[in-house]
Amino acid sequence: MSPRTRRDVLRLSALAAMAVPLAACKSGYSNEPDPLVPLAEQATADAAAANAMASGSSMEAGLARQVAAARAQHAQALQAEVDRLNRPKTAVQVVNPGGSGLTALKQRLATARTQAEQLVPGLERYRAGLVAAVAAGCAGLQQLDDRIGPGAEPGPVTPIPSVPAEAVGPLQKALDAEHAAVWVYGLVSAFLPANYNAGVADGAHEHQDRRDACVRMLDAAGATPDGPQPAYVTPKPVTDGTSAKSVVATAESDAATAWAGVLTGTDDTALRTVALTAMLGSARRGTRWRQAAGESPAVLALIGMPAT
């Protein structure tokens, strides 16, 4: 059997996510206020506040620029979805925290992440994926520096006892991504110095737990879980520490994309919570690995969403 490439895993997950909007979005007009409006307005306010701090070459200004760029992407994506449904407009009170500088940005990110996380379980499928990506983007931003984070730990992925039949296919793709991530963490250990051992071990352990959770959920659904491939082909050759860090970051974004497919493939609130937890974890780890590899941007603002 030829090795499955990591891009194959990503491609399958992205196609699954892209197939959701037309099938899952509700048709017709609703007179209810749009719950995404507060998120869009908050993202716009956060981007403006961060932009006000972004001039200069200081480390604080650099952090502010990254926050401004990501939150502007959130605002644009959320507003486009609000405009698509065109529900009645209502007044929105954005949260403008006290304090100034990075302390205020830290509060803004925590608020925005909480707002998004709380909405995910009850939204239409495509919207749930978008809002989960916003929450994960905020979680990633919190990892840039403790002065704007580090943010709440999402906790472990805990399997649920009953999985709807519709989620079996997406869960298999998440399992494939977790198998690949475990393999990647094993690969890079040979290329990284000893001070990365703890991070590699923690990441490997997290993905092993997620892999095992997928297996248990698929078993409970009466499906045969996919096994791991003997090897996976990385997007670029791993030859040194930098390329090793970069491929781990890719493994995390692949995993987030696969779990986004799970989230948008079901209305089951418990399974959505499982998938959101995994997305948040991969967003946080991915930021740290992209930072270590010197990649820019270090944060994927809408991790798990297909590129447009």
Image (cartoon, rainbow, N blue to C red):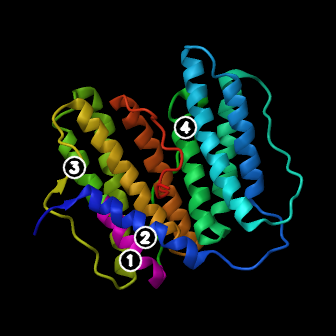
Rendered image quadrant of residue 9: bottom left
Q: Mark 1 and mark 4: span between their CA atoms?
A: 31 Å
SS state under label 3: loop
Say which of 55 and 241 sits in front: 55
SS state under label 4: helix
Marks 2 and 4: which is nearer the front?
2
Looking at the rendering, the stretch of residues picked out in magenta corresponds to 162-177
Marks 2/3 in contact by CB < 8 Å: the verdict is no
Say which of 163 and 51 sits in front: 51
Give the mark nearer the N terminus: 2 vs 1.
2
Residue located beneath label 1 in the image: 169
Q: Mark 2 and mark 1: span between their CA atoms?
A: 9 Å
Percent position of residue 277, x then y: 51, 56
Left/right placement of residue 131 relative to residue 243 reads right
Residue located beneath label 2 in the image: 16
**Residue at x 67% of width, y 47% of height:** 75
Q: Mark 3 and mark 1: span between their CA atoms?
A: 24 Å
Decide whether residue 259 is among the magenta residues. Answer: no
**Residue at x 77% of width, y 55% of height:** 37
Is 297 placed above or below 178 here?
above
Percent position of residue 182, x then y: 26, 53
Q: Mark 3 and mark 4: span between their CA atoms?
A: 26 Å
Circle 1 Cα neighbour tier, 10 Å, few/some/many (<14 / 14–19 / ≥20)? some
Marks 3 and 1: which is nearer the front?
3
Circle 2 Cα neighbour tier, 10 Å, few/some/many (<14 / 14–19 / ≥20)? many
User: As shown in the figure, which amino acid type bears the numbered disc 2?
Assistant: Ala
Q: Work out whether residue 46 can be spotted.
A: yes
Residue located beneath label 3 in the image: 234
Give the mark nearer the N terminus: 2 vs 3.
2
Residue located beneath label 4 in the image: 141
Marks 3 and 4: which is nearer the front?
3
User: As shown in the figure, which amino acid type bears the numbered disc 1?
Assistant: Gly
